[in-house]
Amino acid sequence: MYDEKVRIEAREAMARGESLSAIGKRLGVSRSTLRDWRDNADREPRSSGCPRCTEQPMSAEYAHLLGWYLGDGCLSEHRRQVYALRIACDDKYPRLTDEVAAVIAAVHPTRPVHRTQAIGYTSVVSYWKHWPCLFPQQGSGPKHLRRIELAAWQQEIVAAQPELFVRGLFNSDGCRAANWATRSVGGVVKRYEYPRYQFSNESADIMGLCQEALTRLGVPWRMPRRNALSVARREGVARLDELVGPKA
């Protein structure tokens, strides 16, 4: 998983006469890989398709996938530095499983998207060496036990596509539900119901990202609990109905 900048730097160092051991230690590249680059300098490198390692544009759907990843996604390393991106999707909502698969395919269109059945949920999976380039938040342990911060380039994408980011967050860790309250009308207590959206997450950092995106969209929100965000005002619910809607 090396981008072209690393290859160029390594080849320039080899041209200056620097040893393979020194180059490998400085750049984190194996000696066998360096020898291959040296002995096959004229071979056209195969494009990784990674928009972070090349000049290729990032799909707008990345903001959508980032929301899903922060909610129900994870990265796991396999052999040869290949990573699996997994998004867990509740089997009660097959439409969302299809949506996640389509979003992953839009971000990384050159490889297949797999589905792995588990008890009560389906993991939508894609294998690629460059998933850590797109999700630098990856790390060991639950997200709420470590710092989650967006890189500057991710912040720009979320600022440009807050609608897709919010859709990913709410479709993973949110819901649209009916709430109720009572009101005294003419001395008679009446019960009435109203819809609201709720987003739940144990990570204060991810909750903050959701708050920022909603504020950017002009959607009013409040925090009834530390780990739960509520959107109940009529104009806020109407806006999220446009962007998210019920899961079923």
Image (cartoon, rainbow, N blue to C red):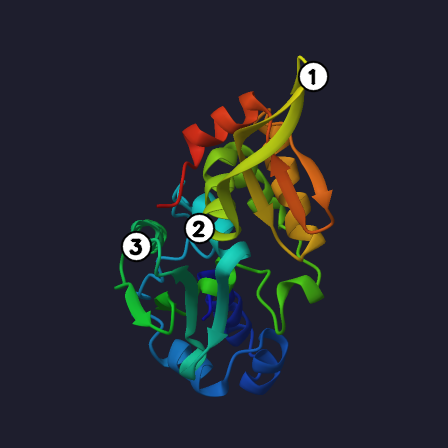
Would you name the residue on which mark 2 appears?
A: 65
Would you name the residue on which mark 1 appears?
A: 187
Would you name the residue on which mark 3 appears?
A: 94
Q: Dots 2 and 1: beta carbons under 8 Å? A: no
What kind of element bears circle 3? helix
Q: Give the mark toward the camera: 3 or 2.
A: 3
Q: Report x, y in % for residue 93.
A: 34, 53
Please state if 225 lies on the left or on the right of 115 as rendered: right
Q: Is residue 246 visible?
A: yes
As rendered, which of 173 and 141 lies closer to the eye? 173
Determine the CA span between mark 3 and mark 1: 47 Å
Give the mark nearest the N terminus, 3 or 1: 3
**Which residue corresponds to the image point at 57% horizontal and 38% vertical from the top-left?**
156
Q: Report x, y in % for residue 234.
A: 55, 22
What kind of element bears circle 1? loop
What kind of element bears circle 2? helix
Please state if 223 lies on the left or on the right of 213 as rendered: right
**Which residue corresponds to the image point at 52% horizontal and 35% vertical from the top-left?**
162
Q: Report x, y in % for residue 108.
A: 34, 56
As rendered, which of 51 and 66 lies closer to the eye? 66
Q: Report x, y in % for residue 29.
A: 52, 79
Determine the CA span between mark 2 and mark 1: 51 Å
As rendered, which of 55 and 140 lies closer to the eye? 140
**In the picture, residue 236 is in which quadrant?**
top right
Q: Amino acid at mark 2?
A: Leu
Determine the CA span between mark 3 and mark 2: 17 Å
As rendered, which of 1 and 157 lies closer to the eye? 157
Does 163 appear above or below 66? above
**Which residue corresponds to the image point at 62% horizontal and 38% vertical from the top-left?**
230
